[in-house]
Amino acid sequence: MRVAELWRYPVKSLQGERVDVVDVGPEGLAGDRQWALFDTSTGLGLTARRVPELLFASARLTPDGGVQVVLPDGTVATDDAVLSAWLGRPVTLRAAGQVTGLRRYENPFDVRDGGEYDWDTFDGARGAFHDSNRTRVSLVSTATLRDWDRRRFRANLVLDGAGEDELVGSRVRLGGAELDVVQPVARCVMVTRPQPGGIGRDTSVLKTVHRERGGMLAVAALVPRPGVVAVGDELTPLGGG
């Protein structure tokens, strides 16, 4: 398998950036999930599980290492007041280094009559705003994606070919980096959400993933050896991690 696409998502749950080459370190791709929006009234981090509108804005890194949020109407903003007005709730945009305590998010755990969800909270990762300390880089193959739009699954690396599931428990080399592939990625309601570019709401995606793949799609990795990864790099298995 070779790297077909590289994606980073500077702000959690917003649209991200496709890049040709990137540094990969202990917290994942440089700039990935380095910011998140928090509801100041609840203290909870926001994700598109709970606030689907997030998927209609995008985030991009700036040359000085900062971030810009591009709202659906094209407005470029980092000001909390503007972001709060857009979402209709009091929010603040925080960098990972500004949050030292627990990062708490919400997950749907049950569906009520009428299709509404009950929600539970969970603790996210330290450092970059990943959902889990065991998820720093995510990889998925074009064979696994089939005809689904890859943006539904927000993987960092899209690989030409097939076979990423068999890599769990092993170490691989990509470019100058080595990754320990530690587990498959469990999928939730977020993969059904509508997004820009004609991606509509589609509950069949999650139903199919549960029916055919046990609720898992893509694999998660940690980064024991940082390095540069580029589109076209070949994935080389190195054996047990």
Image (cartoon, rainbow, N blue to C red):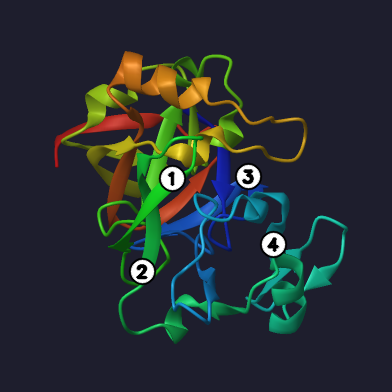
Displayed quadrant of residue 122: bottom left
**Amino acid type of the residue tagged 2 in the rendering:** Arg
Q: Check disc 2: other Cα within 10 Å, few if <14, some if 14-19, many if 20+.
A: some
Q: Is residue 16 visible?
A: no
Q: Which of label 4 and label 3 is nearer to you?
A: 4
| Outermost residue, front side | 113
Asked if the residue under mark 2 is in contact with the one under mark 4, i.e. CB atoms within 8 Å, the reply is no
Quick check: 230 above or below 192?
below
Q: Quadrant of the C terminus?
A: top left
Q: CA distance from mark 1 to mark 3?
A: 38 Å
Image spot of residue 143 (x, y percent): 46, 15
Asked if the residue under mark 2 is in contact with the one under mark 3, i.e. CB atoms within 8 Å, the reply is no
Q: CA distance from mark 3 to mark 2?
A: 32 Å
Sequence order check, earlier mark of 1 and 4: 4
Q: Which mark is residue 104?
A: 2
- Please name the residue that numbered disc 1 is placed on: 117
Residue at coordinates 32% horizontally, 61% vertically from top-left? 121
Viewer-proximal residue, 231 or 90? 90
Residue at coordinates 58% horizontally, 63% vertically from top-left? 11
Displayed quadrant of residue 197: top right
**Amino acid type of the residue tagged 4 in the rendering:** Arg
Left or right position of 48 against 56: left
- Please name the residue that numbered disc 4 is placed on: 60
Q: Quadrant of the N terminus?
A: top left
Image spot of residue 192 (x, y percent): 54, 33
Left or right position of 112 against 9: left
Q: Which of label 3 and label 2 is nearer to you?
A: 2
